[in-house]
Amino acid sequence: MAEILIRRANSADAIAISLVARTSFKEAFYQDFQYKDDLLAYQERTFRVAKIRSSLAKPHNYFWLALVDELPVAYAKLKFPSPTTFSNRAPLAQLQKIYVLEDFLGQGIGRLLQDEVIKKAQQLTAQGLWLSVYQGNTQAVGFYEHYGLQKLATHQFKIGRVDFKFWVMQLKL
C-alpha cells in the first residue's frame, strides 16, 4: 500500500508545485481548449516556478503538498483573508487551488488536503471558506458539495479565447 503524506509546503517545493499544477491543469482542461496555445500561455503565466515561489513567500498564503511514496502528486492553496463580493461573511478564507494528478484521483488525497485547508481556516478564525470551481468539472463540484459547500453565484473567466463558467461556493465555518 502506498504511503500518503500531506505536509505544509515551503519555498523549496516551488518546482514540484509548479509541475503538479501545470500537469493537473492540462489533464483537467485540455479538452476545453480549441487553441492549445491559449492553454500553454495560461500555464506559463500562472504556474511559473518564480510565481509559485513568490506566492509561497506571502504571509497570507498557505500551501500543502501531497506526496505518495515521496512523489509529489497534489497540492492545495489557501488564502486568508480573502474577501469576495459574493458573500457578506467576514473574515473569509479562499481555497484557491486543490490540484491532484489524474493518476492519483480517487485515492482520498483531495479529501486529506481539503481537511487540512478547513482545519487551517478554522484556526485562522475565518467565518467561511469560499472557492470558485469550473461548472463543467462535475466531479469537483460534487466533491465540494459533499463537504457542505453551497453554491452562491456564478461568474465567467476568460482564458485565451475560451469563456469558462464557474460556481462560487461557500462553507460556513
Image (spheres, rainbow, N blue to C red):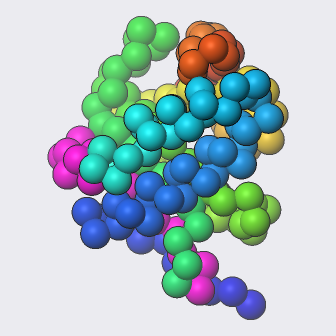
How far from the left and from the top, in percent, is residue 1? 74, 90
Dividing the picture into quadrants, the one containing residue 8 is: bottom left
Could you tell whether 133 is left or right of 117 in the image? Answer: right
**Residue, x 28% and y 69% (percent of image)?**
12
On whether residue 59 falls in the magenta region, the answer is yes
How far from the left and from the top, in percent, is residue 27? 71, 48
**Residue, x 33% and y 27% (percent of image)?**
82
* One can see residue 145 in this view: no
* One can see residue 66 in this view: yes
Q: Give the range drawn in magenta.
A: 53-69
Q: In this view, does 48 lie above or below 12?
A: above
How far from the left and from the top, in percent, is residue 11? 25, 63
On whether residue 99 falls in the magenta region, the answer is no
Dividing the picture into quadrants, the one containing residue 3 is: bottom right
**Residue, x 44% and y 55% (percent of image)?**
18
Depth order, front residue of 11/130: 11
Dividing the picture into quadrants, the one containing residue 55 is: top left
Depth order, front residue of 57/47: 47
Depth order, front residue of 107/38: 38
Could you tell whether 167 is left or right of 158 in the image? Answer: right
